[in-house]
Image (cartoon, helix red, strand yellow):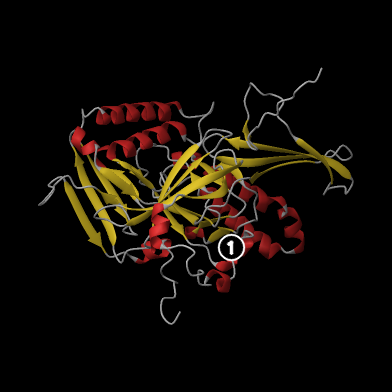
Amino acid sequence: MSQQIESVKKPIFQELTADDPDAEATVIESMCMNCEKNGTTKLLLTKIPHYKDVILMSFDCEHCGFQNNEIQNGGKINENGIKIELEMTNENDLNRQIVKSDYTCVKIPSIDFEIPPQSQKGEVTTVEGIIDRVIAGLIQDQSKRREENPDIAAEIDLFIIKLKALKIIDEPYKIIFEDITGECHVENPNSPQRDHHVKISHFVRSEEQNKMLGIFEANNDELLKPIAPGTFTLEQLEGEVLTFPTNCPECNNPCSTNMKMTNIPHFKEVVIMATVCDICGHRTNEVKSGSGIEPEGIKIEVKINDREDFSRDVLKSETCAMEIPELDFEVGSGALGGRFTTVEGLLTATKDQLISSSTFDGDSADISAGKRLDKFTKILDEILDSKRSITLVLDDPAGNSYIQSLADSGCDDRLKITRYIRNYDQNEELGLNDMKVENY
């Protein structure tokens, strides 16, 4: 009697749950860096809920007892790097949780201090934890320095005093986190309200930074080769749905992405991409501009008063930030990605992401933060039920966002559109400052 065994497809990166206590770990024999004998390394591919795929590594040497635990990014690298400027104003800021990768550079300009990338491993810590770790590292060899070079030891003692003074916060100072992988995060203790003490910007990596991450661009000569005559026309591209292989952003298994070019009336051409994973069921939709960056940025303000306003079509590009001034709420450009939806769909997606995407959810989460989130989501429910009026603001430096006007002719008094000249920082974030546009 033949027995059929049905193979069950599982995500490559699985969540750690009580239902599956015996998660599959890969065990390999590897050399101990302490005694140079062979020890054991265990690798576990898992995911931090609502954050990212990670590889947990645990090493243990039975000969000398040396142990080491590390965490590495298992997902794809972000398109842009991130720069976070945190203004330290009181001792509560020392408790802000920080997620930093191996490539995070930490700077404190007031004392001319810098932790270069790859000098510390990626970790989840606090601002105070970063300062304490630096102090412990400097104190470690001080007794030896005092014997060999007392002048340098005295200078380090003075610098340690400066570092300890940072924990008292007699006056405000700034800490800068700069990460070329874009994988750094600073906790917002007032979430979901805006964090007035944090400034976040993104930047385009240089060629040297890409090489540090193992990213190499294709040969420009290959990219600039003309398409063979008759291969595709613009009309064919607009009429066809193209499919190409990719990896699921949720479980990292192979899947397919469908792409279609379409034209939004009275606006411009856009590219709509949709991905559906057959293994974990994850669905994602993304919209990108099909016509590059506009000469000017655009700021769109629309008053949301009734159900009619919820039906307005909205194109939010991946470079567009969203704001609701009445709630002191702001969403950065990368939070919701590019979307072609309605006002109602955009607010619903914002609510869903707030509920499901807190990096620091868990047993140690701040109870007051959970209460603030519950209160905020109830306010969003009231807005979606047309019980509250708000102003929705879209600010897109690339000029590729759009909200539908409900006026067939004349002026829509609820809709205000302002175009502006981008500043240097906005051009830097879009990668325009170093772009060569003449004699190319």
Provide the secondary structure element on which disc 1 rests: helix
Q: Where is the N terminus found, in terms of image quarters?
A: top right
Which residue matches tag 1? 210
Name the residue at 41% across, 62% down: 430
Corner quadrant of residue 58: top right
Residue 410 versus residue 96: which sits nearer the camera? Answer: 410
| Residue 232 shows up from this direction | yes
Left or right of residue 257, residue 154 in this image: right
Left or right of residue 301, residue 181 in this image: right
Kind of residue at badge 1: Asn
Name the residue at 48% across, 70% down: 229
Which residue is situated farthest in the front direction here? 230
Residue 26 lies, in percent from the top left, at 77, 37
Corner quadrant of residue 253: top right
Residue 335 lies, in percent from the top left, at 42, 45
Rendered position, 129 above or below 15: below
Residue 257 versus residue 393: which sits nearer the camera? Answer: 257
Q: Residues within 10 Å of mark 1 (few under 14, many from 20)?
A: some
